[in-house]
Image (cartoon, grey):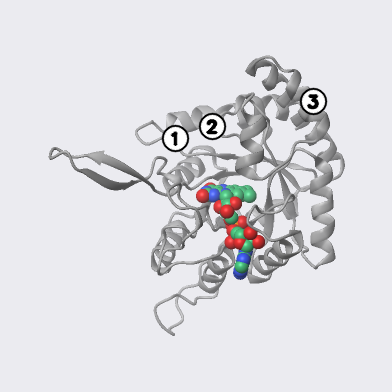
Protein backbone atom coordinates (compact mmCIF):
# COMPACT_ATOMS: atom_id res chain seq x y z
CA UNK A 1 0.00 0.00 0.00
CA UNK A 2 1.15 3.52 -0.69
CA UNK A 3 2.36 5.87 2.04
CA UNK A 4 -0.17 8.46 0.98
CA UNK A 5 -2.99 5.94 1.41
CA UNK A 6 -1.74 5.04 4.90
CA UNK A 7 -1.76 8.74 5.75
CA UNK A 8 -5.23 9.29 4.33
CA UNK A 9 -6.69 6.32 6.18
CA UNK A 10 -5.07 7.15 9.51
CA UNK A 11 -7.35 8.03 12.38
CA UNK A 12 -4.47 9.09 14.61
CA UNK A 13 -0.76 9.84 14.30
CA UNK A 14 1.11 6.96 12.67
CA UNK A 15 4.50 5.54 13.60
CA UNK A 16 7.24 4.99 11.02
CA UNK A 17 11.00 4.77 11.06
CA UNK A 18 14.10 4.78 8.91
CA UNK A 19 16.85 2.19 8.91
CA UNK A 20 20.26 1.97 7.25
CA UNK A 21 21.42 -1.09 5.33
CA UNK A 22 24.11 -2.95 7.29
CA UNK A 23 27.77 -2.52 6.45
CA UNK A 24 28.82 -4.73 3.55
CA UNK A 25 29.38 -8.29 4.71
CA UNK A 26 27.02 -8.10 7.68
CA UNK A 27 23.97 -10.30 7.71
CA UNK A 28 20.43 -9.09 7.14
CA UNK A 29 19.67 -10.49 10.59
CA UNK A 30 21.07 -7.24 12.02
CA UNK A 31 18.26 -5.44 10.17
CA UNK A 32 15.60 -7.77 11.52
CA UNK A 33 17.05 -7.45 15.04
CA UNK A 34 16.57 -3.69 14.73
CA UNK A 35 13.04 -3.93 13.34
CA UNK A 36 11.65 -6.65 15.65
CA UNK A 37 11.49 -4.48 18.80
CA UNK A 38 9.60 -1.77 16.89
CA UNK A 39 6.92 -3.96 15.34
CA UNK A 40 4.56 -3.75 18.32
CA UNK A 41 4.02 -0.04 17.53
CA UNK A 42 2.50 -1.02 14.20
CA UNK A 43 4.69 0.89 11.75
CA UNK A 44 2.82 1.43 8.49
CA UNK A 45 6.02 1.83 6.53
CA UNK A 46 9.75 1.50 7.01
CA UNK A 47 12.22 3.62 5.06
CA UNK A 48 15.56 2.22 3.95
CA UNK A 49 18.33 4.68 3.15
CA UNK A 50 20.54 4.55 0.07
CA UNK A 51 24.28 5.02 0.36
CA UNK A 52 26.28 5.85 -2.69
CA UNK A 53 29.82 4.87 -3.47
CA UNK A 54 32.90 6.18 -1.78
CA UNK A 55 36.39 6.20 -3.21
CA UNK A 56 39.12 4.33 -1.41
CA UNK A 57 42.77 3.78 -2.35
CA UNK A 58 43.99 0.20 -2.35
CA UNK A 59 47.67 -0.70 -2.56
CA UNK A 60 48.50 -3.11 -5.38
CA UNK A 61 51.36 -5.68 -5.44
CA UNK A 62 53.50 -3.31 -7.51
CA UNK A 63 53.18 -0.72 -4.75
CA UNK A 64 50.96 1.58 -6.77
CA UNK A 65 47.71 2.84 -5.32
CA UNK A 66 44.50 2.11 -7.15
CA UNK A 67 41.44 4.32 -6.72
CA UNK A 68 38.43 2.07 -6.22
CA UNK A 69 34.78 2.95 -5.90
CA UNK A 70 32.95 0.93 -3.28
CA UNK A 71 29.61 1.08 -1.54
CA UNK A 72 29.88 0.39 2.16
CA UNK A 73 26.16 -0.13 2.67
CA UNK A 74 24.67 -1.81 -0.37
CA UNK A 75 21.36 -3.69 -0.36
CA UNK A 76 18.63 -1.05 -0.10
CA UNK A 77 16.28 -2.71 -2.58
CA UNK A 78 16.89 -6.24 -1.30
CA UNK A 79 16.24 -5.12 2.28
CA UNK A 80 12.97 -3.46 1.23
CA UNK A 81 11.81 -6.66 -0.45
CA UNK A 82 12.87 -8.70 2.60
CA UNK A 83 11.00 -6.38 4.99
CA UNK A 84 7.80 -6.57 2.95
CA UNK A 85 8.08 -10.32 2.76
CA UNK A 86 8.89 -10.94 6.42
CA UNK A 87 6.72 -8.33 8.16
CA UNK A 88 4.02 -7.52 5.57
CA UNK A 89 4.86 -3.87 6.16
CA UNK A 90 5.41 -1.42 3.34
CA UNK A 91 9.01 -0.50 2.70
CA UNK A 92 10.14 2.77 1.18
CA UNK A 93 13.51 2.68 -0.57
CA UNK A 94 15.37 5.95 -0.84
CA UNK A 95 16.33 6.68 -4.40
CA UNK A 96 19.02 9.25 -5.06
CA UNK A 97 20.24 11.18 -8.10
CA UNK A 98 23.93 10.97 -7.21
CA UNK A 99 25.86 8.29 -9.05
CA UNK A 100 22.97 7.26 -11.29
CA UNK A 101 22.34 7.88 -14.97
CA UNK A 102 18.72 8.38 -15.95
CA UNK A 103 18.71 4.96 -17.58
CA UNK A 104 20.03 3.28 -14.43
CA UNK A 105 17.32 5.08 -12.49
CA UNK A 106 14.71 3.86 -14.93
CA UNK A 107 15.95 0.28 -14.58
CA UNK A 108 16.05 0.54 -10.79
CA UNK A 109 12.43 1.72 -10.82
CA UNK A 110 11.44 -1.18 -13.05
CA UNK A 111 13.08 -3.57 -10.56
CA UNK A 112 11.15 -1.97 -7.72
CA UNK A 113 7.89 -2.23 -9.60
CA UNK A 114 8.50 -5.93 -10.33
CA UNK A 115 9.17 -6.51 -6.64
CA UNK A 116 5.85 -4.93 -5.71
CA UNK A 117 7.52 -1.91 -4.10
CA UNK A 118 5.39 1.08 -5.02
CA UNK A 119 6.81 3.72 -2.68
CA UNK A 120 10.00 5.73 -3.11
CA UNK A 121 11.55 8.68 -1.33
CA UNK A 122 13.17 10.71 -4.11
CA UNK A 123 16.33 12.58 -3.10
CA UNK A 124 19.30 14.25 -4.64
CA UNK A 125 21.84 12.72 -2.25
CA UNK A 126 24.92 14.46 -0.91
CA UNK A 127 28.28 14.92 -2.54
CA UNK A 128 30.71 12.07 -2.08
CA UNK A 129 33.35 12.63 0.57
CA UNK A 130 36.08 13.40 -1.98
CA UNK A 131 34.02 16.15 -3.66
CA UNK A 132 33.21 19.47 -2.05
CA UNK A 133 30.04 20.02 -4.07
CA UNK A 134 27.44 17.66 -5.42
CA UNK A 135 28.23 16.56 -8.97
CA UNK A 136 25.52 14.69 -10.81
CA UNK A 137 26.26 11.71 -13.05
CA UNK A 138 26.92 13.07 -16.54
CA UNK A 139 23.66 11.49 -17.75
CA UNK A 140 21.89 11.87 -14.44
CA UNK A 141 19.81 14.34 -12.49
CA UNK A 142 21.06 17.46 -10.80
CA UNK A 143 18.18 17.87 -8.37
CA UNK A 144 15.55 15.76 -6.70
CA UNK A 145 12.87 17.59 -8.69
CA UNK A 146 14.32 16.14 -11.92
CA UNK A 147 14.20 12.64 -10.47
CA UNK A 148 10.61 13.21 -9.40
CA UNK A 149 9.75 14.31 -12.94
CA UNK A 150 11.23 11.08 -14.27
CA UNK A 151 9.20 8.95 -11.86
CA UNK A 152 6.03 10.91 -12.62
CA UNK A 153 6.68 10.41 -16.32
CA UNK A 154 7.02 6.67 -15.80
CA UNK A 155 3.79 6.73 -13.80
CA UNK A 156 2.12 8.04 -16.94
CA UNK A 157 3.83 5.47 -19.17
CA UNK A 158 6.52 7.80 -20.49
CA UNK A 159 9.91 6.12 -20.35
CA UNK A 160 13.23 7.47 -21.59
CA UNK A 161 13.56 5.46 -24.74
CA UNK A 162 11.18 6.92 -27.25
CA UNK A 163 7.72 8.23 -27.83
CA UNK A 164 6.03 4.87 -27.43
CA UNK A 165 3.62 4.63 -24.51
CA UNK A 166 4.74 1.82 -22.17
CA UNK A 167 3.17 0.20 -19.12
CA UNK A 168 2.74 2.95 -16.53
CA UNK A 169 4.37 2.42 -13.16
CA UNK A 170 2.47 3.34 -10.04
CA UNK A 171 4.82 4.91 -7.52
CA UNK A 172 3.90 7.03 -4.55
CA UNK A 173 6.66 9.61 -4.32
CA UNK A 174 7.94 11.29 -1.18
CA UNK A 175 10.43 14.17 -0.99
CA UNK A 176 12.67 15.72 1.66
CA UNK A 177 11.97 19.04 3.38
CA UNK A 178 14.14 21.09 5.73
CA UNK A 179 12.50 23.01 8.62
CA UNK A 180 15.84 24.75 9.21
CA UNK A 181 16.71 25.14 5.50
CA UNK A 182 18.91 22.89 3.40
CA UNK A 183 22.54 23.80 4.04
CA UNK A 184 23.15 24.88 0.45
CA UNK A 185 20.02 26.99 0.04
CA UNK A 186 20.48 30.75 -0.22
CA UNK A 187 17.60 31.31 2.17
CA UNK A 188 14.43 29.71 3.42
CA UNK A 189 12.31 31.29 0.68
CA UNK A 190 14.33 29.78 -2.20
CA UNK A 191 14.42 26.41 -0.43
CA UNK A 192 10.65 26.46 0.01
CA UNK A 193 10.11 27.37 -3.63
CA UNK A 194 12.23 24.44 -4.71
CA UNK A 195 10.29 22.25 -2.32
CA UNK A 196 7.07 23.43 -3.94
CA UNK A 197 8.54 22.53 -7.33
CA UNK A 198 9.07 18.97 -6.04
CA UNK A 199 5.44 18.77 -4.95
CA UNK A 200 4.25 20.26 -8.24
CA UNK A 201 6.36 17.65 -10.04
CA UNK A 202 4.54 14.84 -8.25
CA UNK A 203 5.79 14.43 -4.67
CA UNK A 204 2.76 13.39 -2.65
CA UNK A 205 4.17 13.94 0.83
CA UNK A 206 7.22 15.41 2.53
CA UNK A 207 9.43 13.92 5.22
CA UNK A 208 11.43 16.46 7.16
CA UNK A 209 15.02 16.54 8.16
CA UNK A 210 15.45 15.97 11.89
CA UNK A 211 14.79 18.93 14.15
CA UNK A 212 14.97 19.37 17.91
CA UNK A 213 12.71 22.34 18.31
CA UNK A 214 9.08 21.67 17.38
CA UNK A 215 8.56 25.38 16.82
CA UNK A 216 10.80 25.08 13.76
CA UNK A 217 8.57 22.34 12.35
CA UNK A 218 5.31 24.21 13.01
CA UNK A 219 6.70 27.36 11.39
CA UNK A 220 7.93 25.35 8.44
CA UNK A 221 4.49 23.80 7.93
CA UNK A 222 2.90 27.26 8.10
CA UNK A 223 5.32 28.63 5.51
CA UNK A 224 4.70 25.64 3.23
CA UNK A 225 0.92 26.13 3.46
CA UNK A 226 1.28 29.84 2.68
CA UNK A 227 2.94 29.10 -0.66
CA UNK A 228 0.52 26.35 -1.60
CA UNK A 229 2.33 23.20 -0.46
CA UNK A 230 -0.66 21.24 0.70
CA UNK A 231 0.65 17.67 0.96
CA UNK A 232 1.19 15.93 4.32
CA UNK A 233 4.45 16.94 6.03
CA UNK A 234 5.83 14.16 8.20
CA UNK A 235 8.14 15.30 11.00
CA UNK A 236 11.44 13.43 11.36
CA UNK A 237 12.75 12.85 14.88
CA UNK A 238 16.22 11.72 15.91
CA UNK A 239 17.03 11.08 19.56
CA UNK A 240 20.49 12.37 20.49
CA UNK A 241 22.67 9.58 21.74
CA UNK A 242 26.25 10.65 22.32
CA UNK A 243 28.16 13.65 23.59
CA UNK A 244 29.56 14.06 20.06
CA UNK A 245 26.05 14.55 18.66
CA UNK A 246 26.17 18.03 20.16
CA UNK A 247 28.57 19.08 17.44
CA UNK A 248 28.10 16.39 14.81
CA UNK A 249 24.36 16.72 14.22
CA UNK A 250 24.32 20.53 13.84
CA UNK A 251 27.28 20.37 11.47
CA UNK A 252 26.25 17.38 9.39
CA UNK A 253 22.50 18.03 9.18
CA UNK A 254 22.40 21.81 9.47
CA UNK A 255 20.14 21.73 12.52
CA UNK A 256 20.29 23.70 15.73
CA UNK A 257 19.57 22.67 19.30
CA UNK A 258 17.20 24.81 21.35
CA UNK A 259 18.93 26.45 24.30
CA UNK A 260 17.16 24.27 26.84
CA UNK A 261 18.45 21.12 25.15
CA UNK A 262 22.00 22.43 24.72
CA UNK A 263 22.13 23.47 28.39
CA UNK A 264 21.05 20.00 29.48
CA UNK A 265 23.47 18.35 27.09
CA UNK A 266 26.33 20.35 28.56
CA UNK A 267 25.57 18.91 31.99
CA UNK A 268 25.81 15.31 30.70
CA UNK A 269 28.94 13.57 31.91
CA UNK A 270 28.81 10.54 29.62
CA UNK A 271 26.90 8.98 26.73
CA UNK A 272 24.59 7.16 29.12
CA UNK A 273 23.38 10.49 30.44
CA UNK A 274 22.97 11.77 26.86
CA UNK A 275 20.85 8.73 25.96
CA UNK A 276 18.55 9.42 28.90
CA UNK A 277 18.24 13.04 27.82
CA UNK A 278 17.72 12.01 24.18
CA UNK A 279 14.84 9.74 25.16
CA UNK A 280 13.22 12.35 27.39
CA UNK A 281 13.56 15.02 24.71
CA UNK A 282 12.24 12.66 22.04
CA UNK A 283 9.20 11.82 24.19
CA UNK A 284 8.52 15.49 24.83
CA UNK A 285 8.81 16.36 21.13
CA UNK A 286 6.69 13.41 20.06
CA UNK A 287 3.95 14.13 22.61
CA UNK A 288 3.60 17.70 21.40
CA UNK A 289 3.62 16.68 17.74
CA UNK A 290 1.01 14.02 18.36
CA UNK A 291 -1.18 16.45 20.25
CA UNK A 292 -0.89 18.83 17.30
CA UNK A 293 -2.29 16.05 15.10
CA UNK A 294 0.68 15.42 12.79
CA UNK A 295 -0.08 12.63 10.30
CA UNK A 296 2.84 10.43 11.30
CA UNK A 297 6.06 10.68 13.30
CA UNK A 298 9.07 9.30 11.47
CA UNK A 299 12.05 8.24 13.60
CA UNK A 300 15.64 8.11 12.45
CA UNK A 301 17.03 4.98 14.08
CA UNK A 302 20.53 5.32 12.63
CA UNK A 303 21.01 1.57 13.16
CA UNK A 304 19.91 1.71 16.78
CA UNK A 305 16.28 1.05 17.57
CA UNK A 306 16.59 0.88 21.37
CA UNK A 307 16.06 4.58 21.97
CA UNK A 308 13.27 4.82 19.40
CA UNK A 309 11.58 1.93 21.18
CA UNK A 310 11.77 3.75 24.52
CA UNK A 311 10.16 6.82 22.95
CA UNK A 312 7.54 4.92 20.96
CA UNK A 313 6.41 2.96 24.01
CA UNK A 314 5.34 6.26 25.61
CA UNK A 315 3.64 7.62 22.49
CA UNK A 316 2.03 4.83 20.43
P1 LIG B 1 17.13 18.88 -3.66
O1 LIG B 1 15.68 18.98 -3.51
O2 LIG B 1 17.69 18.72 -5.02
O3 LIG B 1 17.76 20.18 -2.97
C1 LIG B 1 19.17 20.32 -2.80
C2 LIG B 1 19.53 21.80 -2.75
O4 LIG B 1 19.33 22.38 -4.05
C3 LIG B 1 18.69 22.65 -1.81
O5 LIG B 1 19.53 23.66 -1.29
C4 LIG B 1 17.60 23.26 -2.69
O6 LIG B 1 17.15 24.51 -2.19
C5 LIG B 1 18.33 23.40 -4.02
N1 LIG B 1 17.48 23.15 -5.18
C6 LIG B 1 16.48 22.26 -5.30
N2 LIG B 1 15.99 22.27 -6.55
C7 LIG B 1 16.71 23.18 -7.24
C8 LIG B 1 16.71 23.64 -8.59
N3 LIG B 1 15.83 23.15 -9.48
N4 LIG B 1 17.61 24.57 -8.98
C9 LIG B 1 18.51 25.07 -8.08
N5 LIG B 1 18.56 24.68 -6.79
C10 LIG B 1 17.68 23.74 -6.37
N6 LIG B 1 20.91 11.19 1.39
C11 LIG B 1 21.38 10.02 0.89
O7 LIG B 1 22.44 10.01 0.25
N7 LIG B 1 20.70 8.86 1.07
C12 LIG B 1 19.54 8.79 1.76
O8 LIG B 1 18.97 7.73 1.92
C13 LIG B 1 19.01 10.00 2.29
N8 LIG B 1 17.83 10.01 2.96
C14 LIG B 1 17.30 11.21 3.39
C15 LIG B 1 16.03 11.23 3.98
C16 LIG B 1 15.47 12.42 4.42
C17 LIG B 1 14.09 12.41 5.06
C18 LIG B 1 16.19 13.64 4.28
C19 LIG B 1 15.61 14.93 4.79
C20 LIG B 1 17.45 13.62 3.69
C21 LIG B 1 18.02 12.43 3.21
N9 LIG B 1 19.25 12.38 2.58
C22 LIG B 1 19.75 11.20 2.08
C23 LIG B 1 20.06 13.59 2.47
C24 LIG B 1 19.78 14.36 1.17
O9 LIG B 1 20.16 13.58 0.06
C25 LIG B 1 20.59 15.64 1.23
O10 LIG B 1 20.06 16.50 2.18
C26 LIG B 1 20.82 16.35 -0.10
O11 LIG B 1 21.86 17.31 0.10
C27 LIG B 1 19.61 17.09 -0.64
O12 LIG B 1 18.64 16.24 -1.07
P2 LIG B 1 17.22 16.80 -1.60
O13 LIG B 1 16.50 15.65 -2.12
O14 LIG B 1 16.60 17.64 -0.58
O15 LIG B 1 17.77 17.71 -2.81
Of helix, strand and loop, which one carries label 3? helix
Q: Is mark 1 on a helix, strand or loop?
A: loop
Q: At which x and y percent is residue 125? A: 52, 54
Most extreme residue toward the left, as rendered? 62
Q: Is residue 85 above or below residue 177?
A: above
Please state, as top left, top right, bottom left or bottom right, where the C terminus lies in the image.
Answer: top right
Residue 173 makes an appearance in the image: no
Return the x and y of residue 82 as percentages of the image width and height: 45, 41
Q: Quadrant for residue 272, please give it.
A: top right
The residue lying at 56 percent from left, 71 percent from top is 149
Mark 2 = which residue?
303
Above or below: residue 118 compared with residue 215: below
* Residue 21 shows up from this direction: yes
Front in this rendered view, residue 45 or 275:
275
> What number is the disc on residue 263?
3
Outermost residue to the bottom: 163
Residue bearing the label numbered 1: 22
Closer to viewer: mark 3 or mark 1: 3
Amino acid sequence: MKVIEHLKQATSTLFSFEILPPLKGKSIQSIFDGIDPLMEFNPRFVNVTYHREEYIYKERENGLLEKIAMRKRPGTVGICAAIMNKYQVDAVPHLICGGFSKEETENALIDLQFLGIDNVLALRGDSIKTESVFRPHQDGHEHAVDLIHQITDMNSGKYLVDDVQLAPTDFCIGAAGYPEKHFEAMNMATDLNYLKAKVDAGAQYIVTQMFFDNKKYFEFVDECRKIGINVPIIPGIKPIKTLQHGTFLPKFFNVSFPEELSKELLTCKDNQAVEKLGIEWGIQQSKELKEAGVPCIHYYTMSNSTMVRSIASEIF
